């Protein structure tokens, strides 16, 4: 592969500018690089109570809905007012939702939007372009190996990203009671508005402890993502403003 | 008598029936195979072993990898418990999991059978039979056979067999008192009294072993190892009734009381709740045996064996003394076995036999609606040893095991020994090993009240599931228990190839390569979903692993090499093991490229086979070195030992269930032990010797990661013999 140094490019550009005009900033269609954004400690129905007998966390049983465009929470799992929840969850403003280890997308059985998703067995940085096909909406995934038994495979809850340890984005280790994101897994999704995005879960524990630590409060997602707002599948650059 | 009389009676009748199958035979040839002069000379030099073939044989004539540790060696090394004896040997690792277990050829402790005089010690916790339970006073030698011996011993003899052979009581009346004290308030007191005459003898051994325990995490409440007091009484007797009939009796009782404590986080106030953890373990066995020489060619051995293991565990909250956890466990084994040794000619020896065994389990986790689980097992085995020439020995054996609660199985084995020259012995064997499903896998009936899931052993699953269904607790059954195949024992096919070269009179080198291909490992899988969203789990034959590697050892006597003819002697031995213990599903996934790791900087990277640290707790490399200096005129022995192991995985932090990043490994470490033993002059008929020792000289610890490493331990011991 031929290596072209940035200095050479600059020189080439300068030469062109001298001759005509190096059109890099005037036009609106020129691609700009997309940056990796990080969402920190997005609550996903964290414990509001502890079962006194088992010590297991008990949440509200509600989702947090997150908007990738604005990088903010549309509706928190701590919001228990049903009227508010009703209003927000039927909008297309949110893109991705979290409750405990379950992740949902704004489409199918989860919302009114065009949200679909798939899980790629590839590192986040290696996914430079969203695949053309392979997306499913929540409720439409018939291939979740929720339960693998010697008697056969029984489809589980048909979420776009399958639930259960090692079926989707995480592994649960019962010996040390630790939920750890599977390395080399990238969620590629279409947002409520139909744009492409890719997501990598970094941590399920508050403050993203490194190494992962099960004694820290759980159900807090830290994840990084790239959203392509221009409707194309590239995760490298965008022509949108 | 602890055993119900009827049970003994039933087994005795079984024994009698088996005895009837013994053919009527006559013959005048000698009992031992005729051997060349050189072989006889070797027999005199080399230790004898019984474990490999269930008959007395010179170590040098055994076709499977066998190691022997003699009483003298154990004494020189200051080893008083079996764990200390085995820790010093190349290719063996101790394995901490609910006690100190043994890892042979990369297998967990539940795959190695532990015998005393050929009969199994019972009582495992989470698969581990704690080697600290077994005192080695009065043991003449410890034999270790690597590779499967299920063709002779049945279940658990998959990775290897460790057999403690007790010494026959001496004829003259004698006594022995051992006293030892050391770090961590460890004391060991024992007394042995023995005597006899030409008709037989008796030896009684009593021991008290105690420790104050230790704490490797002083910042947290609770000791890493609890304080304990362990008492053992052991009786061995034999009698020559006629010149054809010999009787032997072994009886053993060991009781250990321990007293520990621990804390759990108190989620209500962020503090902690402290508990006492007290318990008792009782372990007994009774082993009468009769050996009848039917003729010069045929020998019949009848064995009755009873053994039991009881534990009592109590956790009490310290603030109010309320018992928060109580668990009792009671295991009993009754066994009758016969063995016939038939020496057809100088070239052919057949050993065959069979037995019956009844096992009952009691305790909180196993008592079902129909009472305690009980299982019956019957077996038959045959072994033929053939010496086509004085350079070749072939041994073929097979055993059939039938059990009430798992599928019948046949375990064959073939072993060959070839001596191309006097100095070289080559060994090759292929054999099958198996391990019966563990008690929980057969008999557990357990619902976690807090978490809501249920687990059923294979004999309980149908009843348990229908009960839950009747109670309306089942949402969906994934498949009916009636469609399940009977569970099979976990099984292996193993290959061992190696040899020994006596390069010179002062240098001997041996090596053994092994491959254990294991299938049908038992794991839990969900079989139904409950209405509370939790699962019902059953046990299934699923996983496949392999362990493979190389064991090598060299022993040299440098003084002899230098041509020095001294009264003192120096012996140096080094050992090395290379080991790969791998899960086949993981290997497949790594080859497919679907396994990733996440490094400490959060970068994801694809793992290949070279990133795989193998099964947890297995070091790919380990080595030992031992130096023994014996100064006979001064009655002095100095022994220095070291063992090293490379790093090994112990946890997974990046969700791939594989140890791949540095913080998932226990770092490599080396340990050094030393002992000095010196005879001390005392007046009268008494003999005395004094021993000073240090274990873990450089005070290495790995915190709670290696809970059996408390740091440097000093001790002093004094022995009087009469």
Image (spheres, grey):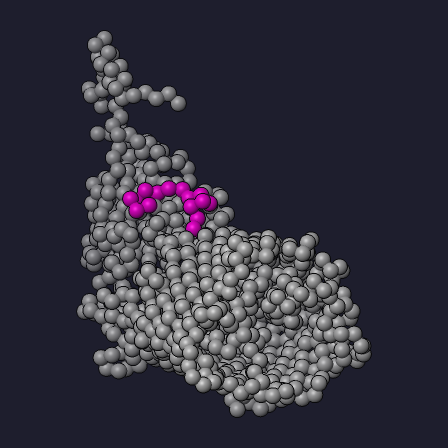
Residue appearing at x 73%, y 74% in the figure: B31
Q: Nearer the viewer, residue B571 or A85?
A: B571
Q: How far from the left and from the top, in percent, is residue B232? A: 45, 82
Q: Quadrant of residue B29?
A: bottom right
Q: Is residue B658 above or below residue B680?
A: above
Q: How far from the left and from the top, in percent, is residue B302? A: 66, 81
Q: Is residue A20 above or below residue B36?
A: above
Q: How far from the left and from the top, in percent, is residue B624? A: 45, 57
Q: Nearer the viewer, residue B600 or B295?
A: B295
Left or right: residue A173 versus residue B195 is left
Residue A7 visible in rendering: yes
User: Does residue B600 belong to the magenta stretch?
Assistant: yes
Instruction: Read off the magenta span.
Output: B599-616
Q: How far from the left and from the top, in percent, is residue A119? A: 38, 44
Residue appearing at x 42%, y 58% in the figure: B643
Query: What is the number of callouts on the image?
Result: 0
Q: Quadrant of residue B42?
A: bottom right
Dominant SS type (magenta): loop
Residue appearing at x 67%, y 56% in the figure: B422
Q: Nearer the viewer, residue B144 or B612?
A: B144
User: Does residue B88 belong to the magenta stretch?
Assistant: no
Left or right: residue B153 versus residue B324 is right
Q: Is residue A20 above or below residue B194?
A: above
């Amino acid at each position: 592969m031929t290596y072209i140094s940035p200095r050479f490019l600059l020189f080439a550009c300068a030469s062109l500018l001298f001759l005509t005009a190096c059109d890099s900033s005037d036009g609106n269609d020129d691609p700009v690089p997309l940056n990796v954004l990080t969402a920190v400690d997005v609550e996903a129905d964290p414990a509001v109570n502890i079962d006194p007998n088992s010590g297991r966390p008990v949440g509200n049983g509600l989702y947090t809905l997150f908007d990738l465009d604005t990088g903010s929470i549309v509706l928190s799992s701590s919001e228990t007012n049903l009227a508010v929840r009703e209003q927000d969850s039927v909008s297309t403003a949110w893109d991705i939702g979290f409750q405990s280890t379950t992740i949902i997308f704004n489409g199918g059985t989860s919302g009114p939007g065009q949200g679909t998703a798939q899980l790629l067995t590839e590192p986040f940085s290696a996914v430079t372009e969203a695949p053309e096909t392979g997306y499913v909406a929540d409720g439409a995934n018939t291939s979740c190996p929720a339960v693998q038994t010697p008697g056969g495979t029984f489809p589980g809850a048909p979420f776009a990203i399958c639930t259960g340890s090692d079926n989707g984005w995480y592994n649960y280790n019962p010996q040390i009671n630790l939920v750890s994101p599977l390395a080399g897994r990238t969620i590629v999704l279409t947002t409520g508005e139909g744009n492409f995005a890719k997501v990598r879960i970094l941590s399920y524990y508050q403050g993203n402890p490194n190494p992962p630590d099960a004694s820290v409060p759980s159900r807090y997602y830290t994840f990084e993502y790239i959203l392509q707002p221009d409707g194309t599948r590239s995760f490298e650059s965008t022509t949108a403003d | 008598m602890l055993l119900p009389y009827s049970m003994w009676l039933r087994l005795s009748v079984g024994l009698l029936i088996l005895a009837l199958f013994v053919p009527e035979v006559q013959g005048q040839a000698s009992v031992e195979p005729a051997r060349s002069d050189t072989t006889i000379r070797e027999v005199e030099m080399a230790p004898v072993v019984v474990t490999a073939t269930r008959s007395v044989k010179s170590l040098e004539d055994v076709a499977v990898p066998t190691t022997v540790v003699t009483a003298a060696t154990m004494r020189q090394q200051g080893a008083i418990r079996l764990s200390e004896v085995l820790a010093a040997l190349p290719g063996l690792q101790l394995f901490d999991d609910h006690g100190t277990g043994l890892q042979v050829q990369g297998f967990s402790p539940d795959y190695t059978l532990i015998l005393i005089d050929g009969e199994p010690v019972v009582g495992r916790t989470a698969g581990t039979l704690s080697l600290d339970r077994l005192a080695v006073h009065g043991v003449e030698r410890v034999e270790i056979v690597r590779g499967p011996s299920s063709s002779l011993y049945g279940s658990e003899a998959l990775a290897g067999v460790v057999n403690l052979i007790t010494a026959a009581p001496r004829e003259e009346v004698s006594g022995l008192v051992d006293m030892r004290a050391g770090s961590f308030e460890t004391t060991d007191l024992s007394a042995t009294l023995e005597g006899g005459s030409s008709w037989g003898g008796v030896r009684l051994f009593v021991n008290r072993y105690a420790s104050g325990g230790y704490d490797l995490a002083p910042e947290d409440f609770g000791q890493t190892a609890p304080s304990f007091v362990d008492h053992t009484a052991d009786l061995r007797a034999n009698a020559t009734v006629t010149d054809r009939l010999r009787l032997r009796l072994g009886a053993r009782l060991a009781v250990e009381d321990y007293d520990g404590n621990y804390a759990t986080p108190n989620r209500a106030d962020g503090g902690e709740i402290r508990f006492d953890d007290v318990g008792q373990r009782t372990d007994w066995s009774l082993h009468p045996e009769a050996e009848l020489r039917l003729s010069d060619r045929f020998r019949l051995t009848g064995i009755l064996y009873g053994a039991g293991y009881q534990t009592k565990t109590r956790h009490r909250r310290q603030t109010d003394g309320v018992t928060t956890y109580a668990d009792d466990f009671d295991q009993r084994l009754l066994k009758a076995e016969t063995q016939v040794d038939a020496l057809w000619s100088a070239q052919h020896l057949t050993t065959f036999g069979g037995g019956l065994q009844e096992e009952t389990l009691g305790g909180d986790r196993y008592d079902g609606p129909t009472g305690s689980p009980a299982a019956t097992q019957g077996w038959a085995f045959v072994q033929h040893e053939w010496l086509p020439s004085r350079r070749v020995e072939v041994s073929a054996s097979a055993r059939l095991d039938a059990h009430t609660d798992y599928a019948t199985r046949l375990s064959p084995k073939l072993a060959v020994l070839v001596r191309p020259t006097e100095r070289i012995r080559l060994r090759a064997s292929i054999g099958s090993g198996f391990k019966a499903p563990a008690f929980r896998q057969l008999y557990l009936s357990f619902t976690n009240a807090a978490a809501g899931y249920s687990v059923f052993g294979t004999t309980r699953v149908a009843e348990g599931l229908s009960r839950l269904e009747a109670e309306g607790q089942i949402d969906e059954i994934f498949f009916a228990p009636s469609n399940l195949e009977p569970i099979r024992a976990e099984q292996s096919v193993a290959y061992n190839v190696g040899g020994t070269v006596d390069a010179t009179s002062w240098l001997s080198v041996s090596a053994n390569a092994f491959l254990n291909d294991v299938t049908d490992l038992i794991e839990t899988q969900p079989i139904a979903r409950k209405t509370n969203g939790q699962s019902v789990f059953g046990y299934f034959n699923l996983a496949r692993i392999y362990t493979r590697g190389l064991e090598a050892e060299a022993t040299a006597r440098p003084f002899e090499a230098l041509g020095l003819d001294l009264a003192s002697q120096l012996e140096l031995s080094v050992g090395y093991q290379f080991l790969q213990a791998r899960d086949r599903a993981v290997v497949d996934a790594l080859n497919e490229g679907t396994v990733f790791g996440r490094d400490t900087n959060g970068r994801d990277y694809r793992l290949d086979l070279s990133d795989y640290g193998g099964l947890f707790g297995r070091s790919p490399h380990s080595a030992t070195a031992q130096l023994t200096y014996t100064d006979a005129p001064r009655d002095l022995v100095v022994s220095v030992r070291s063992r090293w192991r490379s790093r090994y995985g112990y946890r997974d932090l990046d969700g791939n269930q594989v140890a791949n990043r540095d913080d998932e490994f226990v770092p490599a470490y080396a340990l050094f032990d030393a002992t000095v033993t010196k005879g001390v002059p005392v007046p009268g008929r008494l003999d005395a010797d004094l021993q000073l020792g240090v274990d873990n000289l450089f005070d290495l610890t790995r915190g709670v990661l290696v809970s059996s490493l408390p740091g440097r331990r000093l001790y002093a011991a004094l022995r009087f013999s009469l």
